[in-house]
Image: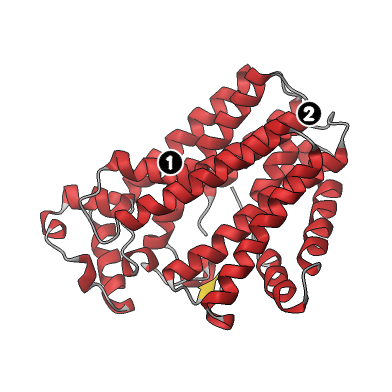
């Protein structure tokens, strides 16, 4: 499909000229929010937001609303809130994982220590809820609250499952839904709510987002085993080193009996993680995990056909789904 940048250009082109304009306003709002809480926290919150990647979640807010959404301030606030929650979870994850790099950039934890990183993440969370409260919609607050509660529950599950390679696929998928998919779901719900769609349409667009988020996480876990550090910004096998059991290892254990006997705590160096990644890849588990993710994306795209979307809106959401399927970093 080409580069991620070209894909984003195609999405924006399909959606209409209002999308890049609104994305620019979302970026400006994020910078304002980061700068308003003292120089130390503002620096680290601002750096975290600036390193925020492709802005897929706020983009979903705008695309779910469509070009007819009249209340642009509410739309911008919703998109900013979603990105703030995402940024907060990254900061807190880096604390829990002891991660030194995030997208190739030193993390808040590695630069400022645990206390500063926790405070930075807490600030981002609080600003997200302040933003969505400005909308004055109880349903919007509920959507964001459900997503953040799911994030916490998913993190607890991940901690409980650490170092246990016998985690069932069903529990792994639940963890992915809680930690990742529910925020994608909330992004689509918020956009649909601002556009004043029916409850049924809000739920259907939310389901589309949830499926995309699940596929996104599955492919993220494939990339952790197969990805190049120059593209991902982190070393291969990071999940293995911190004891996080993901789909590639679960599937590989079913194909290679020797992997079932491996004590994950013995994987303590990058070289050992690299060797385990190679062994997982040799089983064909990466191809199977990727195929599962692509099937989820295809099913999500099918649901768009039953929604009363404008042609450009439908095309843009389809392209977002394609970009998830195509991701390599």
Disc 2 packing (10 Å; few <14; some 14–19; many ≥20): many
In percent of the image, x 36 and y 67: which residue is there? 237
Q: Which residue is mark 2?
A: 195
Residue topped by disc 1: 293
Name the colouring of the figure.
secondary structure
Q: Is residue 17 left or right of residue 168?
A: right
Q: Tag 1's secondary structure?
A: helix
Q: Residues within 10 Å of mark 1 (few under 14, many from 20)?
A: many
- Of residues 161 and 288, the one nearer the viewer is 161
Q: Along the polypeptide, which appears first: circle 1 or circle 2? A: 2
Tally of marks: 2
Q: Quadrant of residue 271?
A: bottom left
For the point 38% across and 40% down, the residue is 174
Counting from the top left corner in percent of width and height, residue 175 is at 39, 45
Residue 116 sits above or below residue 159 on the image: below
| Rendered location of residue 110, percent (x, y) | 53, 80
| Relative vertical location of residue 93 with respect to residue 71 in this rendering, above or below | below
């Amino acid at each position: 499909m080409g580069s991620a940048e070209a894909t984003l250009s195609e999405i924006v082109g399909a959606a209409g000229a209002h999308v890049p304009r609104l994305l620019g306003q979302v970026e400006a709002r994020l910078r304002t929010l980061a700068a308003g809480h003292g120089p130390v926290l503002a620096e680290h919150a601002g750096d975290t937001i600036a390193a925020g990647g492709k802005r897929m979640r706020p983009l979903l807010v705008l695309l779910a609303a469509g070009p007819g959404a009249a209340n642009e301030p509410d739309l911008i606030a919703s998109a900013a809130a979603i990105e703030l929650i995402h940024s907060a979870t990254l900061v807190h994850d880096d604390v829990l994982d002891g991660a030194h790099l995030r997208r190739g950039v030193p993390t808040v934890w590695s630069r400022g220590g645990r206390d500063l990183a926790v405070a930075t993440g807490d600030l981002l969370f609080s600003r997200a809820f302040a933003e969505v409260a400005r909308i004055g919609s109880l349903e919007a607050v509920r959507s964001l609250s459900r997503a953040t509660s799911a994030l916490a529950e998913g993190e607890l599950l991940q901690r409980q499952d650490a170092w246990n390679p016998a985690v069932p696929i069903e529990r792994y998928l639940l963890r992915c839904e809680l930690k990742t998919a529910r925020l994608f779901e909330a992004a689509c719900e918020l956009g649909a709510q601002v556009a004043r769609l029916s409850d049924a349409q809000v739920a259907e667009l939310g389901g589309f987002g949830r499926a995309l988020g699940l596929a996104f996480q599955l492919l993220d876990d494939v990339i952790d085993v197969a990805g190049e550090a120059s593209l991902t910004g982190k070393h291969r096998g990071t999940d293995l080193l911190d004891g996080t059991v993901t789909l590639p290892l679960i599937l590989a254990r079913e194909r290679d009996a020797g992997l079932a006997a491996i004590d994950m705590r013995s994987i303590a160096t990058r070289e050992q993680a690299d060797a385990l990644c190679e062994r997982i890849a040799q089983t064909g588990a990466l191809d199977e995990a990727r195929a599962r993710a692509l099937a989820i994306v295809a099913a999500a795209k099918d649901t768009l056909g039953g929604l009363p979307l404008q042609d450009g809106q439908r095309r843009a959401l389809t392209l977002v789904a394609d970009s998830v399927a195509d991701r390599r970093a």
